[in-house]
Image (tube, rainbow, N blue to C red):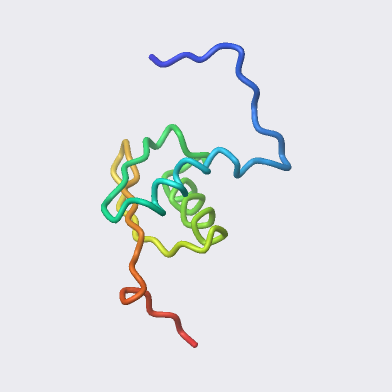
C-alpha cells in the first residue's frame, strides 16, 4: 500500500498539472510508457483513458493507448502515423 503524507491536492484551476511528468516523458520517449490506473483521475477505465487522451491533445501530442486492468500504455505517434481529417 502506497501512502503519502502532507500532500496538497491540486486545485480546480491546476487540475492538469499532475500530468506534466507524463507529457515530458512522452516528448522524449519514442516507445511505450506505462501509467498505473490509480494515478489517473476518473472513475472508470474509459474515463481514465479519456483523461489521458485529453491531456495529451491539449499538449499537442497525438497518442495511441492500450489499457489493461492495472495500467494504461501510451505511445506518442510520429508525424507520418497521424491522419488528420481535413
Looking at the image, which residue is at 47% across and 40% down? 21
Q: Residue furthest front?
A: 28
Looking at the image, which residue is at 31% across and 46% down? 33
Q: Quadrant of residue 65?
A: bottom left
Q: Nearer the viewer, residue 15 or 59?
A: 59
Looking at the image, which residue is at 40% across and 37% down? 37
Whether residue 82 sits left or right of residue 59 in the image: it is left
Indicate whether 21 appears above or below 1: below
In the rendered image, residue 52, in percent from the top left (x then y), is placed at 47, 50
Whether residue 74 sits left or right of residue 13 in the image: it is left
In the rendered image, residue 83, in percent from the top left (x then y), is placed at 38, 79
In the rendered image, residue 71, in percent from the top left (x then y), is placed at 32, 40
In the rendered image, residue 53, in percent from the top left (x then y), is placed at 47, 56
Q: Nearer the viewer, residue 65 or 43?
A: 65
Q: Residue furthest bottom?
A: 86
Q: Quadrant of residue 15?
A: top right
Indicate whether 57 appears above or below 83: above
Amino acid at each position: 500500500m502506497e501512502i503519502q503524507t502532507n500532500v496538497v491536492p491540486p486545485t480546480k484551476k491546476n487540475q492538469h498539472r499532475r500530468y506534466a511528468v507524463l507529457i515530458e516523458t512522452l516528448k522524449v520517449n519514442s516507445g511505450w510508457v506505462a501509467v498505473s490506473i490509480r494515478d489517473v483521475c476518473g472513475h472508470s477505465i474509459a474515463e481514465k483513458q479519456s483523461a489521458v487522451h485529453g491531456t495529451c491533445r491539449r499538449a499537442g501530442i497525438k497518442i495511441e493507448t492500450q489499457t489493461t486492468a492495472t495500467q494504461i500504455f501510451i505511445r506518442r505517434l510520429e508525424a507520418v502515423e497521424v491522419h488528420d481529417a481535413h
